[in-house]
Amino acid sequence: MNLQTVVNVVTAVLVTRVFGSDAIALLRRAAAMGVRVGVSELHRNNQEGGER
């Protein structure tokens, strides 16, 4: 997990505590970003010829 991901997740949690249900969209965005990071890792390993 990189620093930007940690910052996004912590920010989403803090905003949820402050603003309540309106911040659910931020949590979804953080989750989507995590999925994108994972998919890009898979693509990068495939392009480099790495095996899993």
Image (spheres, grey):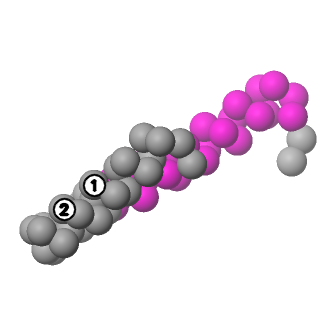
Q: Amino acid at mark 1?
A: Thr
Q: Is residue 6 left or right of residue 49?
A: left
Q: Position of residue 29 (x, y in %)?
A: 33, 54
Tell me if residue 49 comes above or below residue 40 in the rendering: above
Q: Amino acid at mark 2?
A: Val
Q: What's the mark number on residue 11?
A: 1
Tell me if residue 16 comes above or below residue 30 in the rendering: below
Q: What's the mark number on residue 28?
A: none
* In the image, residue 32 lies in the stretch drawn in magenta: yes
The residue depicted at 77 percent of the width and 34 percent of the height is 45
Q: Which residues are magenta?
A: 28-50
Q: Secondary structure at mark 2?
A: helix
What distance separates the C-alpha of mark 1 from that of mark 2? 6 Å
Q: Position of residue 15 (x, y in %)?
A: 18, 62
Q: What's the mark number on residue 15?
A: 2
Q: Position of residue 44 (x, y in %)?
A: 70, 31
Q: Relative to the observer, which residue lies in front, 49 or 16? A: 16
The residue depicted at 28 percent of the width and 59 percent of the height is 12
The residue depicted at 87 percent of the width and 34 percent of the height is 50
